[in-house]
Image: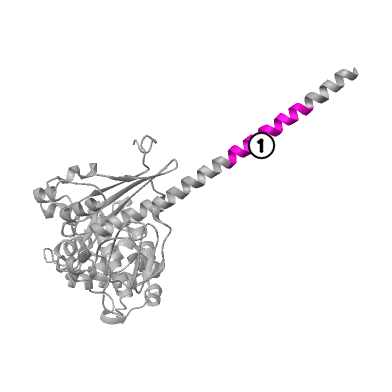
Amino acid sequence: DEMARGQTDFNTRIVISPFPEEAATQSGNDYWRRIGYVPHLTRGFVQLYHMNGNELISGSLSFDGSNKKRLIEVFGQLGIEIPEDEITDNWLKYAITGNFTEEQAKGIATTIADMAGNSAYKKNTNTVDVTKQFGAVMERVFNESYIHICESLARGRQTEGVRGLVNQLAANAHNFNDRYATALNNMKANIDQFSDDDSIVLHELLVYSTIEMMRALHLNEMTLLSNNTISGQRIVQISPDFLYAADASSFQNMLGGFGAKGAKSNRVYSACGLEVSLGDDGNNSDENGNPQSAYGGVDGGAEESSGKKSMTCPFCGAKVWGDPCAAVLSCWDCKAYTKNGRVRYKGDGGHKIRDERAAAKETERRKRRSVKIAAAAERADRRSEAEAKVEDAFRESGLSF
């Protein structure tokens, strides 16, 4: 609040919220899963607050594999000392502060998040890019499913659209865990009612199955065992055009087929507020190894073998987290970078040099402004003197104006 009101000598504040291990130990993992947390990822957050003029910019960056010992080392490298026995609730009082541009502030927060996370949990696919690539297919899920769910929820009974969706998903119910299989069968048996719990079940089924569909497209897994209630089981070849051209009931059935494939492999997907798996409860294979590797690639490896370490930029002194043996190394602050061991750009000196240059530029601007003001004042004085002489001449001649 004080920073937002301009009552501090800094415009940026960055703090870390580690995984709440004390609360997790007290409540147990089952409770944290029920409220949408993902305990086996031990997720923490870097929180950024930055004043850009009169505008407050805030945001959070998540990192997985939260480890307080490593976080204490990260903060120590940045000049902030945190006691080893400090409880999670008190970590927010340890803040990194300073005066930075918006770009610099975001760069620092991103670097801290990279340093704080365990590389064994690192995502190996940019799912945002996957979503953009196959966005038209994903929109079908929302356009042809959620509208019926919302209408049924408002009416308190299943519409024809939801009954069709339930029937197509239920064709794969035997592949889902007891919660989803039971819920689908109950919905099939009670078409004259539709509850909040029913909408939650369908939402989770659609989210999971959509993620599995996007995964299959991304990995080019082009076959799917369709279990259509009309045509029976058959192997179908999948492509974005095929999915987009399919009729609504076939599309929804294939969607359930994607979910079934993920359920058989016990894949778990998680995000803020949701962890969902359609497979056997308590048998999540993704809790072993890299839980973020479902979209392909083997990130494997423990943190120690990742090759990444904290380094100091030789051009600006900023702390950089990276692999010293990587083909390309760059500094988040001064933008200096090397490629294949050769320096390609020495950077702009970092934020300290930029601040000094900006201060010198501002001083020079003020000097020029002062000179202009002085010159304008001098011209005004000369003009006043000339006008006074004219007035005196008129008076002496007996004329007036």
Q: Secondary structure at mark 1?
A: helix
Q: Amino acid at mark 1?
A: Ala
Residue at horizontal 27 percent and vertical 44 percent from the top: 95
Is 189 included in the stretch rendered in magenta?
Answer: no
Total marks placed: 1
Can you identify the residue that label 1 sits on?
375
The span shown in magenta is: 368-386
Left/right placement of residue 250 relative to residue 76 reads: right
Q: Quadrant of residue 122?
A: bottom left
Q: What main secondary structure does the magenta stretch of the protein show?
A: helix
Residue at horizontal 55 percent and vertical 43 percent from the top: 365
| 27 shown above or below 111 | above
Is residue 202 in sight in this rendering? yes
Left/right placement of residue 181 relative to residue 226 reads: left
Left/right placement of residue 315 relative to residue 276 reads: right
Image quarter (top left, top right, bottom left or bottom right) of the C terminus = top right
Image quarter (top left, top right, bottom left or bottom right) of the N terminus = top left
Is 375 included in the stretch rendered in magenta?
Answer: yes
| 317 shown above or below 52 | below
Crowding at label 1, few (<14), some or many (≥20) Cα neighbours within 10 Å? few
Q: How is the image coloured?
A: one colour
Q: Position of residue 215 (x, y in %)?
A: 29, 71
Q: Position of residue 235 (x, y in %)?
A: 27, 82
- Residue nearer the viewer, 245 or 185: 245
Q: Position of residue 201 (x, y in %)?
A: 23, 58
Is residue 171 in sight in this rendering? no
Q: Quadrant of residue 94?
A: top left
Q: Position of residue 232 (x, y in %)?
A: 25, 79
| 246 shown above or below 43 | below
Residue at horizontal 63 percent and vertical 35 percent from the top: 374
